[in-house]
Structures are given as structure tokens and as C-alpha cells.
Image: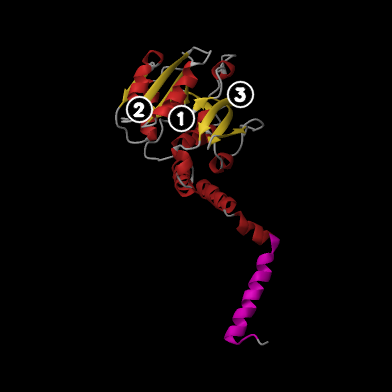
Amino acid sequence: MKLSIITINLNDKDGLQRTIESVICQNFTDYEFIIIDGGSQDGSIDMIDRYKDKIAYSVSEKDTGIYNAMNKGIRQAKGEYCHFLNSGDRLASSDVLSKIFDNDPHDSFICGNFITEKNRVLTKETPYKNRDWTFSLYDIYSGDLCHQAFFIKADNFTKYELYNESFRITSDWRLFFIAIGIHHEPVKYKNVDIVIYNMEGLSSQIGGKVIYEERRKTAQEVLSQSVADKLNRLYYLEQNSYITDIIKSRKWISFAFRIFCKLGKILGFVKE
């Protein structure tokens, strides 16, 4: 089997229906569909039952978070690749999968374009088209990779571990950082619109501080202290680029001089 599509859901019946319908209309058939539900009470279970003949495996039970749910799906997966299509996300067209797997690829990662949806406004993103996939650790450390725009070869979860369930939001990024950034696993880009990504998900709601702290923790765990510190310094300067701009412009010298003069007049050691 070529592909395992894994969908996690919690009390999002309408989003789940959109996701299911985008999967079962595919003209590519060498896939299995796995749904991991976190014990929904909104009718999602009835929705899963309605499409049960199209679903290879489903379960509805409480979990400890999104990565616990994803790991349940990975453990059930039989495909060469895994694709994570969370409830509310949907494949962009009925021929997405046939375009991705038309030449029977075997790269560690395959990625394409994604479309963001917020307040019914669709915005196409093609961030990977001209990317050199041998980019530096810092490119991944400071950047964002759309999980739903990637097809991940399943053996990566054996080589590099399942998703870290102690993280709230960056375990998918952690896999990219370790596998692509550190171990240089090959990534194949295909100019295909893969997913319409639901911007109302958890990753869009949690602030940057949580994301940064989890990334910093990953860097400290998998890199030497000196390299981790360097990444953090670069990231801080980028996030606070106005500081660098002021220093480079030398405006701080004039600003400091004016402050010095004002303090001097107040304290009496600078005369009018």
C-alpha cells in the first residue's frame, strides 16, 4: 500500500465531513483512510459510521493531545507514506494523490503547495517551489513548514521516533528539524496544490512564545549547546530585528547622546 491518510478529530462533525468527502472522491485508490477521534460528543461518531465502508480503521476514545492521537494513527498505518489531514482540512482537488504518486516516488518526504482558508478567504501558498532542500538548520528553526502539505515516508517514524507527546504544537516541526535539517533526508517538491488548510486549528491559535519555547527545547535536546545557543541568538535577533536595524543605522548614538545631555542638565553636570 502506498499511502495512509490519518485524520484526527474532536467535536468537529462538519469539518470531519468535509475532510472525508475530499478523501473518498480521489481518483487514486492505493491508500487507506484512518480516523482517530478523541471521544467526540457532537455527532462525529455518526459521521464516521456513515462512511465506515470507506474507512480502513477508526477509533473513538479519549487521548492526551493531538500528537497522542496522531501516534495512534501511525501505529495503525500500513502505507509506505503517511499524510496527516486533520478534521476541517481537505484535499484541494480529486486528483491530488494521483499527481503526487504518478511516478511511484520513494523520497523520504514529498511536499507541494497549500491553500490557507480563513473567514472563507482562500490564499494559495507556494513556499517550497524554488527552495534548496539542503538549506541550513536555521532555515528550519526559524521557519514554518505546513504539515498537511507533506507526505512523510513511514520509516521516518522508526528512524527518528514517533511524535513527542509532551509538546503541544511543534512535534511535527521537530521531525522536519531532525530528519531534514540534521540528517538531510531528501525532499521532493511537486508543483501540486495539495491541501486547503483550516486556519482555525490549534496551531493557528497558540502564541509564538509556546512555539519558540518548544523549538528551543528541541534544539537543546538534539544539538550541542553551542549550536543551540547560536540558533537561539539568531532567532532572537530576527524576531527583534528593529534592534539590529537601529544598531546598524547608528541612530542609537545620536539617541544616547540626547539622553546623556538631558540627564546632565537635570543632574547639573551639563550646563546650558
Q: Which residue is mark 3?
A: 192
- The colour scheme of the drawn protein is secondary structure
- Determine crowd level at label 3: few under 14, some 14-19, many 20+ residues with C-alpha closer than 10 A: many
Say above or below: 97 vs 157: above
Q: CA distance from mark 3 to mark 1?
A: 20 Å
- What residue would you read off at disc 1? 88
Q: Which residues, given as a range, are shown in magenta?
A: 249-270
Residue that appears at 65% across and 66% down: 252
Q: Nearer the viewer, mark 3 or mark 1?
A: 1
Amino acid of disc 3: Val
Q: Quadrant of residue 76?
A: top left
Q: Earlier in the sequence, mark 3 or mark 2?
A: 2
First in residue order: circle 1 vs circle 2: 2
Q: Residue at x 37, y 36 (%)?
A: 165
Asked if the stretch drawn in magenta spans residue 258, the answer is yes
Q: Which residue shows up at 38% across the image and 13% down it?
A: 53
Q: Residues within 10 Å of mark 1 (few under 14, many from 20)?
A: many
* 213 vs 183, nearest the viewer: 213
Secondary structure category for the residue under label 3: strand
Residue 105 found in image quarter: top right
Task: Give the structural element (helix, strand or loop) at label 1.
Answer: loop
Q: Residue furthest right?
A: 249
As shown in the figure, which amino acid type bears the numbered disc 2?
A: Asp
- Which of the two residues, 28 or 80, is positioned nearer the viewer here? 28
Pointer 2: what residue?
37
Position of residue 179 measured from the top left corner of the image (x, y, whole percent) = 51, 32
Residue 56 colored in magenta in the image: no
